[in-house]
Image (cartoon, rainbow, N blue to C red):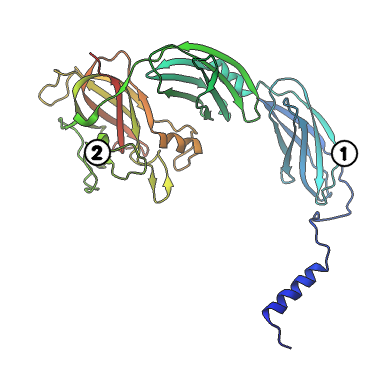
Amino acid sequence: MKLTCSSVIIAIILFIGCDDISMKPITSGSDAPGMITNISVENQPGQAVITYSIPKNQNILYIKAVYPLANGETREVKASYYTNKIVVDGFADTNEHTIKLYAVNRSESSSEPAEVTIKPLENPIWEVFRSLKILPDFAGVKIRGENPTRANIAVEVLEKDTLGNWQMMPSIYTSAMEFSRTNRGLDTIPYNFAVTVRDRFLNYTDTIYETITPFFEEKIDMSRFTELKLTGDAEKSPENPSLPGLSSIWMNAPDYKNWQRFMTGRSQTDPQFVTFNMNKEVKLSRIKITNFGESSGNVDFYVDGHMRVFEIWGLGKNELINGDWSDDWQLLGRFENIKPSGLPLNQNSSEDIEAGRAGFDYDFDTEAGKVQYIRIKCIENWVGTTWFQIQSIVLFGDTRG
């Protein structure tokens, strides 16, 4: 008998149609497992770790904790039978809470609940809240705080508009131990701000309010910048002769995908310098540095010759002496490029990548005077040496007067 492809398909359909197919547990008809025993609790900030003994020989699939949250929702947390611990989280207060624990077997039969009382420590959002500062910044407002437990938090920022209504500004999402973010684009007039902290369970702190007046700044016209070669300045990378010279860092548009970055030679072991002339005296406020970040589909801004620890120095209009270093150079800032997540090399969180793509802002010493010449000194890159690469820079300050 010769079967065609269509007849085989029809036969399969008819065979399937004869059976009552439904999604069922792996095992059916088994008795409910015994209760969880030997329960102990370790209370932690905003959560608790519950340790227990699992019923033996009961075909257990997982352990389930069920409890109400402050928002009225019931939360369920599951843990594999391979472990004897479960974390219950999402608590806004330090009150006592009753948790019901169930052993669930492979037929989805649950045990009788074993109840345990927890008393979580203070939710991490409150420690963050107490550290918050709302500060004036150049053309913006700076929100600064500490997050010692590295909790995943959101800092919500609101600005009161001219009609007296509160409007949301970009929030800060972070798990870093310290954070400092600036929302820019503001005029030099008083603004009213409100800031609150929440966790991923929508538990909120109180709100702090502050009126601040941003400092004036403008983007510096970098079309007049010229490269300056002083004694001891680093050479362009001989290992990568096709890469452009120093002037590319102010001629490039900030773009972390642009492989046309400036790079110094790898052989020198002492801190490396490069120098340029702004051809105008400026009171500088900050510098934004964009690192080359994307190569062959991989995104990493905390690797190789990206500057990790560095200094920026400035010199006034009439203070350059014979092309050499002089005591008149003033330190505008010593900086460290900090990965928000704190993860090791070659490991990056979404927050790390977001920060790198946005570019890194570094504020200069507000007490520093006007400068015309700039010197960048790389003390250490992300692999522990001193060669460095920069995709682009943007300088900001006050050219008035």
Q: Residue at x 46, y 23 (%)?
A: 180
Q: Position of residue 321 (x, y in %)?
A: 11, 21
Q: Is residue 243 above or below residue 194?
A: below
Mark closer to the observer (2, 1): 2
In screen coordinates, is 295 left or right of 17? left
Amino acid under disc 2: Ser
Q: Residue furthest left?
A: 322
Mark 2, residue position? 248
Q: Is residue 225 visible?
A: no
Identity of the amino acid at label 1?
Answer: Glu
**Cα separation between marks 2 and 1:** 70 Å
Q: Is residue 205 above or below residue 273?
A: above
Query: Which residue is pictured at 84% across the width and 49% down the height?
Result: 58
Q: Residue furthest front?
A: 163
Residues at discs 2 and 1 in contact (Cβ within 8 Å): no
Upstream in the sequence, badge 2 or badge 1? 1
The image quadrant of residue 49 is top right
Compare residues 152 and 83 and report the one nearer the observer: 152
Check disc 1: other Cα within 10 Å, few if <14, some if 14-19, many if 20+: some
Q: How many marks?
A: 2
Horizontally, is 155 left or right of 234 in the view? right
Mark 1 residue element: loop
- What residue does disc 1 label? 112
Q: Position of residue 303 (x, y in %)?
A: 39, 41
Horizontal placement of 327 versus 355: left or right? left
- The dot on residue 179 is none
Residue 178 image point, x, y percent:
49, 24
* Quadrant of the frame with the N terminus: bottom right
**Disc 2 residue crowd, few under 14, some 14–19, many 20+, Cα 10 Å:** some
Q: Nearest the camera: 28 or 36?
A: 28
Residue 65 horizontal/vertical position (percent)? 77, 36
